[in-house]
Image (cartoon, rainbow, N blue to C red):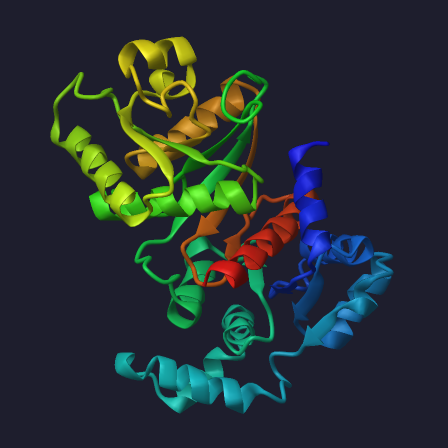
Amino acid sequence: MDLLQQIVDRARSNRQRIVLPEATEERTLRAADRALRDEIADIILVGNPTEIHKLAEAWGLDNIGKATIVDPLNNPKAEEYAALLAELRKKKGMTLAQARELVKNPLYLGCMIIKTEGADGQISGALSTTGETLRPALQIIKCAPGVTCVSGAMLLITKAKQYGEDGIVVMGDVAVTPMPDADQLSQIAICTAQTAQCVAGFAEPRVAMLSFSTKGSASHEVVDKVVEATRFTKQRAPELKIDGELQADAALVPAVGQKKAPGSAIAGNANVLIVPNLEVGNIGYKLVQRLGDAIAIGPILQGIARPVNDLSRGCSIDDVYYMIAITACQAQDAKLTH
């Protein structure tokens, strides 16, 4: 069974409540209909109910009636949400009047539904920028305990079955933090290992902290950062299997790993790759995707107390559908760990 089907099955086994604040956007509504048909999540649509039902009828979507619809301009909980939002943002100077306006914004409203435990996760980005998706999540839901930096993981399904987990590797950060320091890089490593477990289904994440040096073969301050991040991670998560600093070939290829990092349990055996900065992550995954003909799934945002995920504005219906399943898997995990 392929990885995407496993993710869908895992989502279906313990249905979560997922908010789609861009409910009148065609790809989003079509994916919602399919998710409801396949029973992979309970869907909460934010938008005008009349408009949503009219679009569903026009597009021949038969399952939208099973969704919960929240109208941002006629919401019985608007005042409750506004009061809570004003309280949450009081130190930043937010007034009740400003909060009343913000809870009419579907992206903010979705995060308030999650904050008050009416939903478990949210997906947007088909119409919104990454900043617009992340801002309400960080202001309202906030980071997970012990985390100060949000990051994005990419699932890479490659044809090189001898590497990673039967050809699958999880890479981070590919999306959010341009130049993490050692502390942030350590957080990214822990969060990415967690994503590998709860989304990719890895029984045992084996984390390689990547650099252009392996075990002191080169010296530079950027190498020192990776060494320090590895040390921090071992202190924070002693149960996590991790090693660094390792070059990519030493991390993935057993013969190279044994030669360059003898005695390392991770070298030649890694299935989670942590890159030193966002440039490397973003360029690296796109090279693997295009030159290696790999499937890239993500970015999957991590480090938020409840999952909020960002779609590309060029996303397909499939992309939205699978991101609903991925967000549901993250939500299952968040309930266990936070």
Q: Quadrant of residue 18?
A: bottom right
Spot occupied by residue 289 in the image (x, y as percentages of width and height): 52, 25
Residue that appears at 60% across and 75% down: 118
Q: Is residue 185 visible?
A: no
Q: Nearer the viewer, residue 101 or 265?
A: 265
Task: Check the image and report above or below for 192 versus 27.
Answer: above
Spot occupied by residue 298 in the image (x, y as percentages of width and height): 53, 42
Q: Quadrant of residue 78?
A: bottom right
Number of numbered discs visible in the structure rendering: 0
Task: Check the image and report above or below for 109 versus 272.
Answer: below
Spot occupied by residue 337 in the image (x, y as percentages of width and height): 47, 59
Q: Which image quarter is the N terminus in? A: top right
Spot occupied by residue 101 in the image (x, y as percentages of width and height): 47, 83
Q: Nearer the viewer, residue 64 or 120?
A: 120
Residue that appears at 82% across and 56% down: 37
Residue that appears at 44% across and 69% down: 141
Q: Is residue 214 visible?
A: yes
Q: Nearer the viewer, residue 115 or 70?
A: 115
Q: Nearer the viewer, residue 157 or 229?
A: 229
Q: Which image quarter is the C terminus in? A: bottom left
Task: Check the image and report above or below for 236 versus 50.
Answer: above
Residue that appears at 37% across and 80% down: 88
